[in-house]
Image: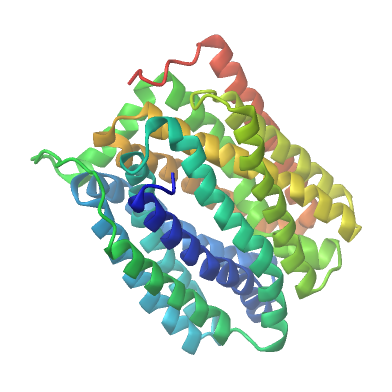
Amino acid sequence: MFAQAGYRRLWAARTVSQWGDVVQFTTMALLVLRLTGSGLGVSGAVVAEVLPVVVLAPLAGPLVDRLPRVKVMVAADVGRALLASGLAVWHGQVAIAYAVAFGLSAGSVFFNPAAGSLLPTLVEDSQLVAANSGIWSAAVLSQVVLAPVAGVLAGTVGYTAAFALNAASFAISAVLLGGLRSGEAPRPVTTTSMWHQGRQALGLLAADRLLRALALAQGLAALSAGATSALLVVLIRRHVHATTTDYGLALAAIGVGAFAGPLILSRLRPTAHDARIVFGAFGLRGAVDLILATVTALPAALGALVGYGLGTSTGNVSFSSLIQRHVPDDTRGRIFSAFDLIWHSARLVSIIAGGAIADACGIRTVYYAGGVLLILAALTGISAIRRQPTPDATET
């Protein structure tokens, strides 16, 4: 894939941007926990990240299918660079942290479906799994290396440098993407509104048996993962009784597993339409949540988190490749945004409930419930594709 100049630029832009994201994700959770002192406060930051998806996803998908996707991505990066710069200067109030989290997520609502929809125009169809794996592997390797550094940085130097690094990463990404020349075909002009097209995307998803199975399982998984991922910092600090540096190690452990996932996929050489890998990954992550709710030793928690990263990476790479092959180019942005809407709507419910449950009943209850929901997502998805055979990748 790296022989294609367009893929090289997309890979480099997303990798550089991920460097800043890892540092900000690590330090933002620690900052909000310090400012609020509660699991509900940490959940509030994640709610601020989820709300833009729920509100803007029906608009973002049709816009991505109408406009040149590279320009959409550059505009999103420029906006996010400005917002992250502001947080580097003003981060002493939780309201400012929430506002910036909201704005950064709004940029991602447009950037992510554009990037996912653009990739099939940059590489051959047979290279999609490898291309997605390359982007994913670079991202998680960044997490392995930088998450522990970010934890140390927050505990010693402070938060300004971390947020400034994220701003710089968005600016560099915008420059790299500005020189990307894609093979996108001109899109026909449509007279229907973008909101109407967004509603149509949900209809397209409901009419396709494979997409229906994926959507149902993804919704159940989001009801789990919203709370457990947002409250990992609470689990590590209060249940495992670890330090801020250990929280960075926990994120790095997830990254180790996530880096191994694409390597395993490349050896198995799965077909892109094999949804069993996606659903099996949900089950693996559910088992990990049950383990995390039980163990208290840091080494055991880190080992379980490696498994969580493995399930996350194999599931996400397979999911993206599956959608890119299964869905036509002219509706791909809307389908990606529809899945974003499903995921983040259920995730929002999970985050709000999870923060309250963590403060009232303890963090272990959140992780036990999350594990059960993820296993249910796996069983639901596998059952659906057994009842109705998965269509060929060329079926639309």
- Residue found 43% across the figure and 45% down from its top: 340
- Residue found 56% across the figure and 87% down from its top: 92
Q: Position of residue 156 (x, y in %)?
A: 71, 87
User: Residue 25 sits in which quadrant?
Assistant: bottom right
User: Residue 138 sits in which quadrant?
Assistant: bottom right
Q: Residue furthest front?
A: 3
Total marks drawn?
0
- Residue found 83% across the figure and 45% down from its top: 291
The quadrant of the rendering that contains the C terminus is top left
- Residue found 48% across the figure and 89% down from its top: 89
Residue 205, compared with residue 154, is above or below; it is above
Residue 257, compared with residue 208, is above or below; it is below
Residue 326, compared with residue 373, is above or below; it is above
Front residue of 288/253: it is 253
User: Residue 333 sits in which quadrant?
Assistant: top left
Q: Is residue 224 left or right of residue 294?
A: left
Q: Position of residue 34 (x, y in %)?
A: 68, 79
Q: Is residue 192 left or right of residue 224?
A: left
Q: Residue furthest right?
A: 297
Q: What colouring does the structure picture have? A: rainbow
Q: Is residue 90 visible?
A: no
The quadrant of the rendering that contains the N terminus is top left
Residue 379, compared with residue 28, is above or below; it is above
Q: Position of residue 369 (x, y in %)?
A: 73, 42
Q: Is residue 211 visible?
A: yes
Q: Position of residue 388 (x, y in %)?
A: 50, 11
Q: Is residue 120 left or right of residue 89?
A: left
Front residue of 35/250: it is 250
